[in-house]
Image (cartoon, rainbow, N blue to C red):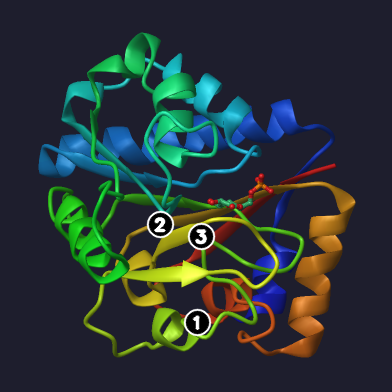
Amino acid sequence: MGAADVLESAQRFADPGQAADALAQRVGEVIRYAVRARGRASLLVPGGRTPVPLFEALSGIDLPWESVYVSLTDERRVPPADPASNARLVDEYLLNGQAADAHFYPLHREGIDARADEAACGAALSMLPRPFDAVILGMGTDGHTASLFPGDPSLVRGLDPDTEAHCVATRAPDAPYDRLSLTLHTLTSSRWIALHISGQEKWQTLQSGIRAGDPQRFPVLAVLSQKKVPTHVYWSA
Ligand SMILES: O=C1O[C@H](COP(=O)(O)O)[C@@H](O)[C@H](O)[C@H]1O
């Protein structure tokens, strides 16, 4: 399946609440299956604003959360209490209600340099069952996914299919914060991937990316066009 086919088979919803509910139900099924089959499940989630209704929906689903190991696709290198922290977002909106029993492994450690933080990020991920059972990615209107940004010199490392690195320290030319991102190789060391986006502008970004065919300009394309693991697009107006 090529990137255009992935887009063609996207699930499209009238509003963000519907997309979040449908995706939450599907992730619930994936988690239930993984726990039944292997005793534990791993879930990677994005940051930003799009996943808030998804986290709220997921946290209300009755799942064997005590067997679920959660981490992030990427993080801003800010203190955990900072409003920009993706770990804080997960803490506020996902690890509540039924989901309070999940095990959460933040990626970023304060007070260390970028290379040491890459290693800390890899160590956090090593606590999760692999391959990851469910990876949910977001996307920016510039075509970045996780924190793999166009125009960032570290994108080459992030997209290198043969890299041994789990995480890469990144810095977007036009976006705030030093960041950590899982590499493409690590994101796709998974059984199931969803791309969760909303708004016409992001839909157009996806179409432009597919037309351009260049993952260096539209890093999300690297996920959509890889053949290791199927990607499911959940979009809402
Ligand atoms: O900075 C980030 O941006 C993207 C997209 O965020 P959104 O607010 O437009 O939903 C997100 O997927 C990524 O995890 C985050 O760190």
Residue in the image at 72% along x and 77% along y: 4
Cβ atoms under marks 2 and 3 closer than 8 Å:
no
Residue in the image at 56% along x and 37% along y: 23
- Estimate the spatial distance between the alpha carbons at disc 1 and disc 3, rounded to whole Å: 11 Å
Label 1 neighbour load within 10 Å: few <14, some 14-19, many 20+: many
Secondary structure beneath disc 1? helix
Label 3 neighbour load within 10 Å: few <14, some 14-19, many 20+: many
Q: Where does residue 172 sit, x and y in percent of width and height?
A: 60, 69
Q: Which residue is mark 1?
A: 155
Residue in the image at 24% along x and 40% along y: 105
Q: Is residue 96 left or right of residue 237?
A: left
Which residue is more in the foreground, 66 or 80?
Answer: 80
In the rendered view of the protein, which quadrant contains the C terminus? top right
Q: Is residue 57 above or below residue 12?
A: above
Q: Where does residue 178 sit, x and y in percent of width and height?
A: 48, 60
- Estimate the spatial distance between the alpha carbons at disc 1 and disc 2, rounded to whole Å: 23 Å
Q: Amino acid at mark 2?
A: Trp
Residue in the image at 16% along x and 42% along y: 37
The image's mark for residue 220 is: none
Q: Amino acid at mark 3?
A: Ala
Secondary structure beneath disc 3? loop
Q: Earlier in the sequence, mark 1 or mark 3?
A: 3
Q: Where does residue 123 sit, x and y in percent of width and height?
A: 14, 57
The image's mark for residue 192 is: 2
- Estimate the spatial distance between the alpha carbons at disc 2 and disc 3, rounded to whole Å: 16 Å
Q: Is residue 188 left or right of residue 143?
A: left
Mark 3, ligand 1, within 8 Å: the answer is yes
Q: Nearer the viewer, mark 2 or mark 3?
A: 3
The image's mark for residue 146 is: 3
Label 2 neighbour load within 10 Å: few <14, some 14-19, many 20+: many
Q: Amino acid at mark 1?
A: Leu
